Amino acid sequence: MPQDVLADLAALGPFFAVHSHPSGADPDAPWRPLRELADQPEPMLSRIGSVRAALASRGGRPVDEIELKVAASVAHLGLVARLIAPALAAIAGQHRLDMRLDGLWWQDKLGGPVPLSVPERAYPVPDHGESHGSVAAHDCHRFVDEVIAPITSTISELVPVSRRVLWGNVASAVNGAAQQVATRRADLARQARTTAAAFFSSPLLAQERQPPGPGFRRSSCCLIYRIAGDRVHGVCGDCVLAVAP
């Protein structure tokens, strides 16, 4: 993979930066295959447990005071935001990253975006002269279906947390990534908005009543307010519970 692609992504912020590894290779530990989060309950439950313990420690509370569904939602939001950011930026910038589930590797670390590694050789995409919008829609839908949906389904099957909450997390991550790209790269602002709209056209995000953009407000809540101690000020800016300015 050209180093300028990695540099372009890293310049957008830590959620966009990725490592790379030879296609078809298995990186050495502490790298782990991302597919384990979709196919195996233990790695996902362990991740949720680690997030739950971190939330409890941050608030000076016993772990059992942190609702499992809150920890699951926070863990999910962190993972999908980490995955969506480079995928959206690559599509917006017309870089052909291989973001298929079987080629992605991660490290189970807390305290920031999880390290993510992608195959060095981009997957081949034939050029038939399609518009950026049509290519973006194809790539975004496939990414949602093949990467985000399996991880989201695993969490919803393991923990009693609403799928509406989880897919709201996805929508929030898409909108946040697009806004970051538009802020850092004015030359990609239009493509970022087009790519975000392509993500939102997925049937799995049909619950969202508002289009992506600076004023976007999701149709659900990530639940973090339940441990913030303040329902008015303990919600995110795009939360359905946020007080209108």
Image (cartoon, rainbow, N blue to C red):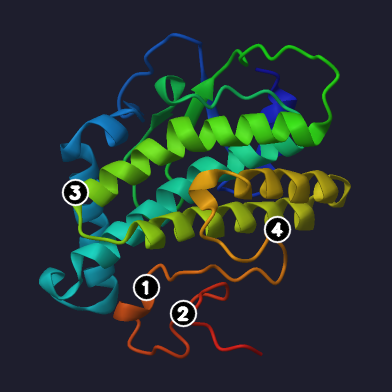
Identify which amino acid the numbered label 2 is placed on. Answer: Val
For marks 3 and 2, the one nearer the N-term is 3
Task: Identify the image quadrant of the N terminus.
Answer: top right
User: Is there any visible trace of residue 18 in the rendered image?
Assistant: no
As drawn, is 28 to the left or to the right of 42? right
Image location (x, y in percent) of residue 245: 66, 90
Image location (x, y in percent) of residue 179: 70, 58
SS at badge 3: helix
| Front residue (pair 28, 85) | 85
* Quadrant position of residue 9: top right
| Front residue (pair 201, 32) | 201
Q: Which residue is mark 1?
A: 224
Residue at left 20%, top 32%?
40
Q: Which residue is mark 4?
A: 179
Question: Relative to residue 212, is residue 157 depicted above or below?
Answer: above
Q: Nearer the viewer, mark 1 or mark 3?
A: 3
Image location (x, y in percent) of residue 157: 22, 47
Residue at left 68%, top 49%?
196
Disc 4 and disc 1: Cα gap in Å?
A: 22 Å
Disc 4 and disc 2: Cα gap in Å?
A: 19 Å
Q: How many marks?
A: 4
Disc 1 to disc 2: CB gap under 8 Å: yes
Disc 1 to disc 3: CB gap under 8 Å: no
Which label number is shown at residue 235? 2
For marks 1 and 2, the one nearer the N-term is 1
Identify which amino acid the numbered label 4 is placed on. Answer: Gln
SS at badge 4: helix
As drawn, is 58 to the left or to the right of 8? left
As drawn, is 62 to the left or to the right of 36? left
